Image (cartoon, rainbow, N blue to C red):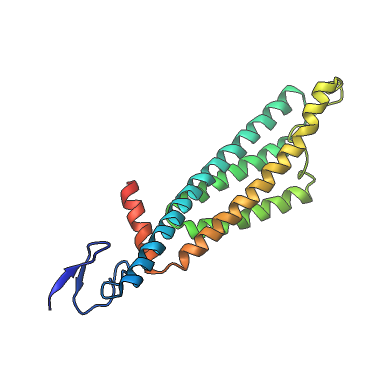
């Protein structure tokens, strides 16, 4: 039986096979089917790139939470304020997102699910412990007597709220992207492997 190369991925394919077993390209299909495949492949490649950005994005969340922990810890020491529980919580979140980032290199779909669940979990914890929607640093009144500093520290809770809302939206988008990739079948698996090979 004669063998050919797939027109898309160059994998060996027998003349009797209708589509490539590796990427799903309709080798024996019509011109319209091949065009639809190429169009779908381009969309899948965009999703794969978004998925790769999602894995890198989780690392940025880890850095942000660790930076917040450092700031809260520093202010607690400088102004003799007890916000160490907040600092420890942010450290825990940062470390957790770091390990989720490592997991994402193996399974971005599982990373997206666990990251969103973890986000909901530590949000509930912060809310139940009176940490949510508060400034990460609450200084005493003597430090916030002037109008400028008072305004600055009044904006901190708002900025923190916007950060948390953005985090939730981004994590939901990550999960939606991974769900679409899961539905892509052979073509998505091929595109993911090709992207990882090219990236390495």
Depicted 115 relative to depicted 189: above or below: above
Which residue is painted at 65% across and 41% down in the image? 90
Left or right position of 130 against 33: right
Q: Residue furthest left?
A: 2
Q: x, y percentage for residue 26? A: 30, 72
> 77 or 66, which is in the foreground?
66
Left or right position of 25 against 133: left
Depicted 197 relative to depicted 176: above or below: above
Where residue 136 sits, quadrant-wise, is: top right
> Which quadrant is the N terminus positioned in?
bottom left
Which residue is painted at 66% across and 30% down in the image? 71
Depicted 80 relative to depicted 118: above or below: above
Q: x, y percentage for residue 148? A: 81, 22
Where residue 130 sits, quadrant-wise, is: top right
> 158 or 42, which is in the foreground?
42
- Number of numbered discs visible in the structure rendering: 0
Q: x, y percentage for residue 54? A: 51, 50
Q: Residue furthest front?
A: 31
Which residue is painted at 67% across and 55% down in the image? 120
Left or right position of 44 against 23: right
> 33 or 150, which is in the foreground?
33
Q: x, y percentage for residue 169? A: 63, 52
Which residue is painted at 47% across and 66% down in the image? 182
């Amino acid at each position: 039986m004669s063998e050919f190369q797939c027109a898309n991925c160059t994998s060996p394919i027998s003349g009797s096979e209708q589509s490539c077993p590796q990427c799903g390209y309709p080798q024996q299909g019509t011109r319209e089917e091949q065009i639809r495949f190429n169009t779908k492949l381009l969309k899948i490649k965009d999703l794969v790139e978004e998925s790769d950005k999602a894995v890198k994005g989780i690392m940025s969340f880890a850095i942000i939470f660790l930076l917040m922990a450092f700031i809260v810890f520093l202010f607690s020491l400088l102004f003799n304020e007890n916000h160490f529980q907040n600092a420890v919580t942010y450290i825990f979140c940062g470390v957790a997102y770091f390990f989720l980032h490592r997991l994402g290199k193996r399974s971005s779909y599982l990373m997206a699910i666990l990251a969103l669940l973890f986000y909901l979990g530590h949000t509930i914890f912060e809310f139940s412990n009176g940490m949510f929607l508060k400034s990460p640093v609450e200084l005493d009144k003597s430090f916030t007597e002037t109008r400028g500093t008072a305004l600055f520290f009044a904006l901190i809770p708002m900025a923190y709220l916007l950060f948390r809302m953005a985090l939730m939206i981004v994590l939901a988008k990550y999960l939606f992207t991974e769900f679409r990739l899961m539905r892509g079948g052979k073509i998505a698996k091929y595109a993911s492997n090709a992207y990882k090979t090219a990236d390495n």
